[in-house]
Image: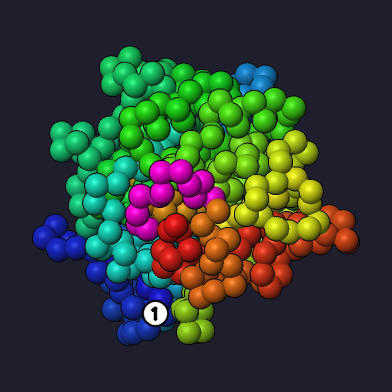
Amino acid sequence: MRTTTSPASPTSPATPVRSGRRGRAGASILGAAALVLAGLGTAAQANAAPAHTTPSKVTWAATPCATPKHKGDLTCNSFRVTGGTTAFQKARAADTGEAAAVTPKAAAAGPTGYGPSDLQDAYGLTGAASGNGSGETIAIVDAYDDPNAAADLAKYRSYYGLPACTVASGCFKKVSQTGSTTSLPSADSGWAEEESLDLDMASAVCPNCKILLVEATSASMANLGKAVNEAVTLGAKFVSNSYGGAESSSDTSYDTSYFKHAGVAITVSAGDEGYGAEYPASSRYVTSVGGTALSTSSNSRGWTEKVWNTSSTEGTGSGCSAYDAKPTWQTDTGCAKRTVSDVSAVADPATGVSVYDSYGVTAGWYTFGGTSASAPIIAAVYALAGTPGSSDYPAAYPYAAAGTSALNDVTSGSNGSCSSSASYLCTARSGYDGPTGLGTPEGTDAFTG
């Protein structure tokens, strides 16, 4: 079954409407009404949309945090849609018989990207998302402060009928890299967009989970690494990181200092610059998360995916690490060291996800993409699967499920050019490949020990 997400009423849960960078289907009136209810524009806009209108090409721009503030800074892996007709809008238009009425050139009145029920349905998680996750904490690690994080998160969750997750209830907590709730980093609107994306994706996939936002003082590896350690110290067993940078000879020491946490599932976005490995996605102790383009389909799953790739310099990251040793559970032979990625999830901005954001931008709904979306999605899947074994490195878990129905094998697309002798490093194939790893989740079975 495929779904496109409808807003929740104030008294009921969200109801699916059946439709088929780093530094790195119905009458026209009903169709129009459906567009308005979906938050895709005003009634006048919806009624004005002729059924023969051709959807426009999606455009996007890197979020400001994709440009480093200082030399050596790591950068976020996200893009914000600036125009065109997204996959979410196209799917809804196909259901209603009307063309998509608006383009997300600025904040929209309602979502123009995939929402919780879409993501849960696409990845076989609807049941797990309803029943699992209570007592688990997902930590989101980013740089700088988002002053509106709690309020924006509340907007997202309320709109979609997700359980409230507030500071007062103890469900949501925001701290600095030292654990302080009062002495926070300086605010940054670019990183605030990233934080909204991460918080909303964790919420979408694991609505019952608690969320801990740990804000690093800056985007240096040292400060972001300290934030990872603080997240673990505060009890998080699932830590999402949506940033990266160029590999260096210091990476193996960073591994030991910041990412070697047995019993904790640490996910890292693989990057948004196409073929090529970046750190910390190449750390042997993390689950490296690649990106796909996700679209509705008439197949039995109701969805289809391919490698996210826009150009030779924009698409999911993948590749062979120059420094990090290969973990024992990784058995591909074209790379002697650590291969990126392990698994994947939606990242293409054209098939992007719905996010609510208000800090430094017009308050409202935006559509985002980039592997910054896929990393928190996978962290939340791990959380739905349950607490990892205390001595485990959960990056190994999906490999035990390789080739099974627990993973959707992504077999088409590439993210660049690589050696013909190891073409799988940049080209999707049956089984393991670099851009999408072992595939995308189909339930939680591949993410439990």
Residue nearer the viewer, 186 or 181 = 181
Can residue 344 be seen?
no
* Residue that sits furthest to the top in the current view: 183
Please indicate whether residue 115 sits to the left or right of residue 30 in the image: right
Position of residue 175 measured from the top left corner of the image (x, y, whole percent): 33, 25
Position of residue 78 measured from the top left corner of the image (x, y, whole percent): 55, 43
Locate the C terminus and report the quarter of the image it occupies.
bottom left
Range of residues picked out in magenta = 384-395
Tell me the residue at 71%/38% (across/down): 324
From the image, give the main secondary structure of the stretch colored magenta: loop
Position of residue 99 measured from the top left corner of the image (x, y, whole percent): 46, 73
State yes or no: residue 123 in magenta: no
Tell me the residue at 67%/64% (across/down): 432
Residue nearer the viewer, 194 or 169 = 169
Q: Quadrant of residue 243?
A: top right
Position of residue 75 measured from the top left corner of the image (x, y, whole percent): 59, 32
Mark 1: amino acid: Met
The correct choice, above or below, for 87 with respect to 352 in the image is: below
Please indicate whether residue 82 sits to the left or right of residue 140 in the image: right
Q: Give the secondary structure at mark 1.
A: loop
Q: Quadrant of residue 253?
A: top right
Locate the N terminus and report the quarter of the image it occupies.
bottom left
The correct choice, above or below, for 200 with respect to 195 in the image is: below
Please indicate whether residue 157 sits to the left or right of residue 57 in the image: left
* Residue that sits furthest to the right in the current view: 420
Tell me the residue at 62%/69% (across/down): 410
**Residue at label 1?**
1
